[in-house]
Image: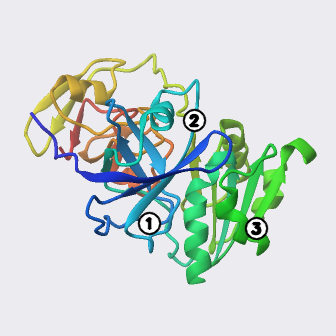
Amino acid sequence: MKARPITTVKTVVAGIEAAGTGIKLFTLTDPDRWELPPFKPGAHIDLHLPNGLVRTYSLCNEPADNTRYVIAVKREADGRGGSRALHDDIRVGDVIGVSLPRGGLDPGAGISRHVFIAGGIGVTPFLSMARHLARTGEADFTLHLIVREEVPLSAHLTSLMKEGRVVVHRTSRTGRPDLAPLIGAAGPDTMVACCGPEGMTDDFERATAAWPAANVHVERFVAPPPVIDPDAKPFTLFLARSGAEIQVRAGQTMLAALQEGGVDVATSCCGGICGACKVGWIEGKPVHRDRILLPYERERYLMVCVAGSDAERLVLDL
């Protein structure tokens, strides 16, 4: 029993360069240097590494730069292994399968002002967006980069820093700034976004609690601990395309049940923050526990790694 095919693109590592302490910039291209599938500014791709790991990274080049995907990876010695594999094992010329790009920020939709809050290496998705906005002039933007001392990807941020588009806040000198004044007042034409460590994103969510959900975007480094529901009950998944029924035991994730049933579903973070396992739902009452879907998206999609069900039967578009 199979779900829809998981599409990957064959890419070749065309370049690797140092981009700060413990950070490497990887450039991936089509083997024949054709254009790659298009993407939005700050979109994500899943890298299917040769050792079997699948890891999600933000693209830091802009969509007009369409013959390559560029990602920045900080080596995390105590991470889940993806960054170590990229830093220690991957060389120029290696072949890596890459998912079709997904997500990213929409620079249109009537937004005239963007405020980006980045913590350290969390600047990567906003570098893509900033480059796009600076080139097209579609909207005004300010990127607040909060670092301890060293600026990551400094060679790629220098021109924007000189223009005053990127404001660096060094916590070793002034402490971490209050985010509310940096974000400013809510408005229908303002989009605010944050990517950084947990404490920063928590502060950002508190500062934007009264904002319209559609105008706030958050990306996290690490998935939050899984939600344990002591009242969880078993339920049935009905797969609309194949006609199969799969039982989900009390306390079991949809993802685990689908995998037990032989259904292939793309995964990466397994914690509701990357979007790799997004699946459409057609009927039922899902319980959304992800940190990535917008309210209107939840009317059609769920993340099978963390979602549950408040009904005995949930119909998926699989």
Q: Is residue 136 above or below residue 303?
A: below
Residue at the extreme right of the image, as rendered:
174
- Specify which label sits upstream in the sequence, 3 or 1: 1
Residue 111 makes an appearance in the image: no
Q: Amino acid at mark 3?
A: Met
Classify mark 2: helix, strand or loop: loop
Residue ID at (38%, 45%) = 46
Taking the image as shown, residue 87 lies to the left or right of residue 306, namely right
Which sits in the foreground, 65 or 257?
65
Which sits in the foreground, 211 or 166?
166
Q: Is residue 295 above or below residue 106?
A: above
How far from the left and from the top, in percent, is residue 57?
47, 47
Circle 3 packing at 10 Å, graded few (<14), some (14-19), many (20+), is: some
Q: Amino acid at mark 1?
A: Lys
Closer to viewer: mark 3 or mark 1: 3
- Specify which label sits upstream in the sequence, 1 or 2: 1
Q: Is residue 154 above or below residue 1?
A: below
Circle 2 packing at 10 Å, graded few (<14), some (14-19), many (20+), is: some
Check contact, mark 3 vs mark 1: CB within 8 A: no
Q: Which residue is mark 2?
A: 75
Q: Which residue is mark 1?
A: 40
Among the 4 quarters of the image, the one containing residue 308: top left
Quadrant where the image shows the N terminus: top left
Q: Which mark is residue 165?
A: none
- Specify which label sits upstream in the sequence, 2 or 3: 2
Q: Which residue is mark 3?
A: 161
Q: CA distance from mark 1 to mark 2?
A: 26 Å
Q: Amino acid at mark 2?
A: Arg
Taking the image as shown, residue 304 lies to the left or right of residue 41, namely left
How far from the left and from the top, in percent, is residue 8?
25, 50
